[in-house]
Image: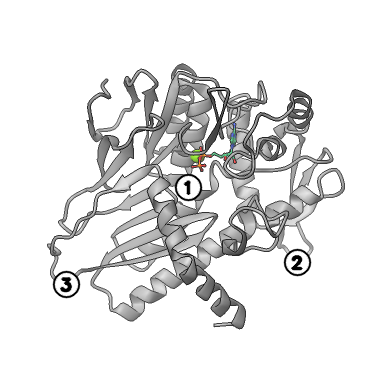
Amino acid sequence: MTKKQNLLKKKLKNKFYLSLFFVIILNIIIFPNFSCSENLSAEEYSRVEFVLGTVCQIRLLTALPKKKVDKVFDDCFAELVKLDAIFNANTEHSDYGIGELDRTEISELELVNQNAGKEPVPVSKELFELLKITIDIAEKTDGAFNPAIGALVKCWDIGFSGKSVPPKKEILSTLAISNFHDIELKETKSSSGKIEYTVFLKKTGMRLDLGGVAKGYAADKLSSIIRRFGIENALIDIGGNVFALGKNSKGQDWSIGLKNPNIGEQGIAGVLHVSGLSVVTSGNYERYFKEDGKIYHHILDCKTGYPVETRLNAVSVISDKSLYADLLSTTCFVLGEEKSRNLIVELRKKTGSEISVLFFYKDNSVRLISEDKLSLEVKSPFAF
Ligand code: ADP
Ligand code: MG
């Protein structure tokens, strides 16, 4: 371990209680299962670290020796650190966000942002791939999900220093440089046959932001690593983006609680029993501020430049791909139920993925778009 890594480890230890604080604000609750393992040779292992700007927990159920299990954890967290260095949207100031807990000095995404209006930047396959997917969704949804929303996100800065509504002039000028059509992706084959990827943002001041999808993308990468080691039963939780693999220690489906999305209320709105599925929620109750009695939350509408005005409090997406669960929870929150329907049908057909969507309305009614068999309990006062 290098000196830098050691220092980081120390810092992370010191910040463990801060991490615990973050655990309680996440939007899902995973029910603990302390019973003895059904499969006597399998043991449960867990590791928690602060990466990707959030608390990440991995639980593994396996009969592999402890040394091998440590290797699985090491590989998983190394992957998360690598993805943080690509996708982190908050590395433009060293004192930004969680400060010393942030691992990445300057991310690849930030390099692209700093070269907006100047020149194309060579990027990793990961950034290129995720931009391609999100631009495709942006095109299909007329920008409801917009990967070029970064300047507007910074203008509001909700969840960080943003505590009041920015001047309208500022909102409109950042909107003008938040157009996903101004992202230019290029894929070229070098003379040696290597594929090179570049991204160019055409407008000065323009910024990418993949905060609405990066955690889901990361959860899929972790599930591949875990499965590669032959582990079938595990739970990945990246800041509330959950991926439940196989079964829990009782040999049953994992129980995922969906937090009550009414601001100021505690408890859960429902429980999903899942296996091989990811569950991700986007809502107005996660990051927001109040001004003149009005809630301003962190999911923004690129048609207006303001937080999405909706009858919804939250949207949960259940999918066998965490990428879609994360991407679509944000997208469907912006689109609303009716416009989401066609998109879901189209994506299910195109990708072959299972996708179900739960809409939680402000009047406590719940609606579900699903073609799959879901084991779901909705708790009073929430009702279909
Ligand atoms: P979480 O904050 O839990 O990851 P989401 O997955 O819904 O919640 O992502 C919200 C984040 O996505 C915001 O903090 C912002 O960075 C980004 N974002 C906000 N509005 C949009 C939008 N319309 N399109 C794409 N990304 C958005
Ligand atoms: Mg999302």
The spot of residue 225 in percent (x, y) is 42, 63
Q: CA separation, marks 3 and 1? A: 31 Å
The spot of residue 229 in percent (x, y) is 36, 68
Quadrant position of the N terminus in the picture: bottom right
63 over 89 or under it: above or below: below
Snapshot colouring: one colour
> Which residue is the site of mark 1?
216
Query: Of residues 130 and 53, which is closer to you in this image?
Result: 53
Q: Label 1 amino acid? A: Gly
Q: Ligand 1 is found in which quarter of the picture? A: top right
Q: Label 3 amino acid? A: Ser
Residue at the spot 78% in from the left edge and 45% down from the top edge: 200
Q: Label 2 amino acid? A: Ser
Q: Is mark 1 within 8 Å of ligand 2?
A: yes
Element at label 3? loop
> Which residue is the site of mark 2?
192
